Each structure stands twice: as C-alpha cells, then as structure tokens.
Image (cartoon, grey):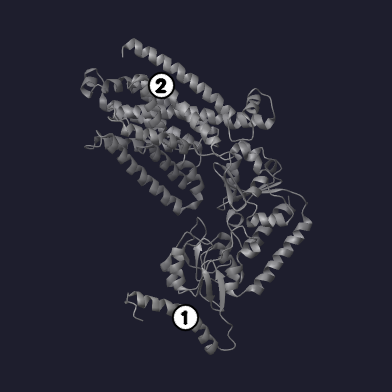
Amino acid sequence: MPVSLKSAAAQRGRRALLAFLPALAFLASGLLAAPAQAQQKTLETAFGPVTVKAQPERIITLDEGALDTVLAMGLQPVGSVAARGGKDLPGYLQAHAKNVPIVGVTREPSLEAIFSQRPDLILASPGLEKRVYDILSKMAPTIVPTTPTTAPWQERNALYVAALGKEEEMASRIAQVQARIASLRERIEPGQSFSVVRWMPQGPMAMSSKMITGQILSALGMQGTAIADELGERPHSDILSLENLGSVDADWMFLATLNEQGDATLAAAREQPAFNRLDAVRNNRAVTVDGQIWSSSTGVLAAERIIDDIERFLLNP
Amino acid sequence: MSKRRGRQLLHRTAIAGAGLAGVLMFASMLLGAGNLTPLESLHALLGQGSEDHRFIVFELRWPRTILAILVGVALGAAGTIMQAATRNPLAEPGLLGVSAGASFAVVLAIYYGADTAGVHFGIAILGALVGCFLVLLTTQMRGAGNDPVRLVLAGAAFSSILMSITTLILLHDQRTADEIRFWVIGALGGRPVSNLQWAVPGLLAGLAMVGATVAALAAMSLGEKVAMGLGHKPVFTRILAMTGVAVLVGTATAAAGPIAFAGLIVPYFARRLVGPDVRRALPIAMLIGPCVLLLADILSRLAVRPYELPIGIVTACIGAPVLIAVVRSHRLPRL
C-alpha cells in the first residue's frame, strides 16, 4: 500500500478501505472458515466493537481481574502486569501462574515487552488511556470493559470471560462460589457487622462496602459500617483521624495490608491507644488479611480466597 | 532602637507570644476532627463527660499538642539560627534540604529494616548533619553564599535529588512504602507517645548548642572582623550553630516528619516584631514557633473533617506566600 502518500484524497480512500475491511473479513471468514472452527465474535468494549478470534492463545492481561479470570479458566497468559505496588504477580495468583512474564505495571504497561510476546488478545483495565489503547489495539484486539470497579464481582470480568469464550465454565464456577456463600450464611451468627480497613502508619482508611469483599460479606448477611457504605463508588476513604476511629469499629474488623507482613501491621496498630479501645480489638476480632486480595482484587479466584478467610475467622472465633 | 526600648519591646512581645501560645494550646485541646463539640471537649477537659470524650482529649489531643510545642520551638530556633549563621533570610531547614536529609536518612534506615524510635532519632540527626554540612559548603561557593535566592536554589536541587532517590526506594520496595510516606510528609497526629521521650533531650541539647552561639552570631552580624576583634571565632561558631541546627531539625523530623516552611515563617515574624538582632529574635521565635505549629495543626484537623490533612501541607500553604513576600520585598534584608 502506498503509505507514503500524504494527500487528503489518499487518506480518505484509505479510511474508506479500512471501514470496508471488517465486511471483507466477514465475507472471507464465511467463505474460508472450516465448518468445525467456531466463529469469531465481536464484543462491545469501551472503545467500540472489537472482533476477537474464537480461541485466543497468546493472551496479555493488563488488569488483575483479567489475570484472575484467565488463570481461573485454566489458561496461562503470555504476559501480565505486576500487582499494584509490587514487581511480581499478586501473591494469591502466583500458585496458579506458571512463569508468566511481567510486562510492566498497571499504570505503565511496557509496550515493547507486550509487542515482543506477539499477543492475539489483550485484556486491559477499564481505565485504559486512549493513547495507550491506540497503540495496543494495533498489536492485538484489546478488550477494555466499561464496568465500574464497584460492579457486582460476578459481572465485573464478564467481558474478559466473553473474550476468552469461557462463558459456561465461568458461570458454573461462579455458581459454586454462590453456593458456598449460601451455605456459609447458614453457619454464621446472623446480623453481625463488619469493617474492612487498610491500616496506614497515620491511621486507617475505610474500604468501601461496594468492593468485592464488602459485596461478599453483605451477601453473607453482614452489615457494613456507615462510613464504608457512604463511600459508594470511591474504593476507600482518606486516612481517618484517630479521633474518629470508632467509625470503623464493628463486630469483625478486617485489617488489609498491601504486603504479607500482617503481624507487623497489627503490631503497629496496637501502638495506638485509640486502636486498642475498639470493640473488635478488645474482643480479639480484629484480624489481618492479605490486602492484595481484600482491597484491590476482583475475580472468582479472589472471591474463593476471601470466602476461605471468612470461614477461617468466623467459624473459629 | 535604644537598649531600654528594645528590652521593653522584647518583654511585651514575649508576653503577647506566650499568651497567644496559651490560647492556641487551649484551642488545640478543644478543636479536632472528632465527633464532639468544643463544649463537650471542655467538659472532658474538666474531667467530666463520657469516657470516649476524655480519651480523645487526653490521649489523642494532649500528646499532639505537646508535640506541636516541642517541634515548634525546635524549628523556630533552628530557622532563626540558620538564617543568622548563613546570613541569609531565606535559609530554612526545609528549603535548604536539611529536613530532606533527615527524612531521607530515616527512609533509608526503614528500608534497611530499622524500626525503633531511638534509632530513628539518631539517624535523623545524622541525616540533618549531612544536610547542614552541605549547606555550609554551598555558602562557601562563589556567588551562592552571598545570594539568598541562589542558596535556596541549591537547596531545592539537593532536596530533589533526595526526593528522587526516595521515590526510587519506593518503587523498589513497596513494603516500606507506607511507612516511608509517613516520613516524607510531616504529621503530628498518630505519632507514638514514646516519641516525646526522645524529643525532649534532643530539643534541650540542640537549644544548648545554639544558645551558646547567640552572642557570637550577634557580633558576626556586624562583620567577621568585628566579631574576631571581640574575641569570637566565626568558623567555630558557624560549625557549632549548624550542628545545633542539625540536632534540632533531626529531632523535629524524627518526632513529626519534615514540616516545610515552619523554619522560614517563624523567624520572619520574629524579626518583624523585635528586629533582626538574633539575641532578641531567638526567644521570640521560640514562642512563635509553637503558635504557628499549633495553629497549623488545628487547621489540619478542621479542614477536611472527619479526615485530617498532614500538617506539612498546611504549613506549606501558609509558608509559600511568606517566601514569595520575602523574595519580592524590594530589598532582601541582609543579616
């Protein structure tokens, strides 16, 4: 193609040709595809319709929820971004992943590293910038969902699932999790309150009840604190004044730490007299949990781990 | 200004400053981000009211009020002495990278696994000393020492280097990141009460050191030759003064993190009130320092209730206009 031609007419011509391409491709696929091969599918993404081949093999995940989904479906991505604030995959997913190369961090995916993996599908985060999308979409079909982070956890990764063509497997996997939730709900004391906080050296941040952990705890019939309920779409509050620490007190307090040094976090919190006055702490019901799962993940593997944690703490108080 | 009138002015300003500090201390006990009215706080202060309220007033507000006073005295004194020793009205521990040196040293120590309060104090003072030494070197550089703005530029460059290394550590090791963020922004709330035990000796030692240099610094403001004629040793004085400044800034940083601009605002107001003589400015700065810190801390608690701003953000908001005012004023006062 005479790419070097810069005249307006040539550009218009090229655009017309480009617009015509999907139709051509459709015709071609109709004519050439073997009957046994499944059809390509077109998905509605944040940047318009994107056509994905039936069984993508070289998948890049630029979102923790996407990685969770891919691994849950027994697939291995050919590249993934590191966990938020880390240099490796999220700890809870490492057991499922086999030597998945790191291709940058969520905020700054490494375009060259992605390109060198020759992907045939890129699963990106809802907030992907147009600038980055334009480049990625030249390498492979790039799926950017429109779902907000506070969408029900079962639906949040639905577009990734559709892109993988794994709708049925995922539906049954989610049904299993729902069944576990329903059975756990029967076994725990009804009407308890919960609070998920991220403990910083200055004090705590309340995590919104609309995040995956809050959704699961609510589905178990537990109540969030007023401050966590009011956050709504915001993932977490600012750092609370120690004077208002009472507002994150609850029957169960889950302290999410972004690293696995839960004990150190609890020890740091215990240096604050205000923390030791909380009912949850006095009743020994302030427990530390992995913040990578409890405060920044979303997906079926994360949901399973969260339910594991809840079972462990609430059934053996 | 005659000696007698100067002394009268000093006394009157000192009484007013102490009175203001007392009022702000009281306000600091009554106002906060918590869910209780000032009247309820007053009841709690008098030993009445609910246990929760008494806890907030005595266990949360009282320690940070004391911390604000200690840090205010330290930064006010450090700023005044630093300006006198470098003869530069823009010299300020925050602007010249001394605070950055102290907090960077702490960050480095956290990165390598330190965590006891005592170690932090020692390390912060060491970092501040390195920062002070670099400032002294900069003042010896041709041009920079005589030009207040250039000195500030050199300090800004030094601070940026330290900031970028801190960012590098943050990128490299997220585990320390939460703690590091705590150290690169100053805040009074939530500091362990054990900090106070370390802050008091540090403050006293620093004050003793800078106090010993006041007479010599006052003489040096008349010219080095005059000071030498009066039997003072300018080089020794400068080194002792800057070491004292390092102890004060290191102590303040270890206790509350770097609090920008406090060391600039306080001496500025002190000189406006009692004139440039360091012998008068120092005691006044030690009274105004706590006032500025208490006021900034009260604002930090009220600005975004039920959350709190770090005090460093509030002092920066007050301090930046003062910095611009000093630089813009037609002639920079030469000290």
Which chain is home to disc 2?
A: B
Task: Using the image, determine if residue A236 lies above or below residue B269.
Answer: below
Task: Kindly identify the residue that appears in the image at 54 percent across and 43 percent down.
Answer: A201
Q: Cβ–Cβ below 8 Å for labels 1 and 2?
A: no
Question: Where is the N terminus of chain B found, in terms of image quarters?
Answer: top left
Question: Which residue ends up furthest to the front in the rendered image?
Answer: A9
Provide residue A155's location: percent of width, then percent of height: 64, 65
- The label nearer to you, 1 versus 2, is 1
Which residue is under mark 2? Answer: B284
For the residue pair A109 and B206, the one nearer the viewer reads as A109
Task: Kindly identify the residue that appears in the image at 65 percent across and 64 percent down.
Answer: A154
Task: Kindly identify the residue that appears in the image at 46 percent across and 66 percent down.
Answer: A133
Which mark, by number, is residue B172? Answer: none
- Dot 1: element: helix
Provide residue B234's location: percent of width, then percent of height: 26, 25
Q: Is residue B5 visible?
A: yes
Locate residue B91 relative to residue A43 in the image: left or right.
left
Question: What's under tag 1, amino acid-wise?
Answer: Phe
Which residue is under mark 1? Answer: A20
Task: Using the image, determine if residue B288 lies above or below residue A210.
Answer: above
Task: Using the image, determine if residue B6 lies above or below residue A307.
Answer: above
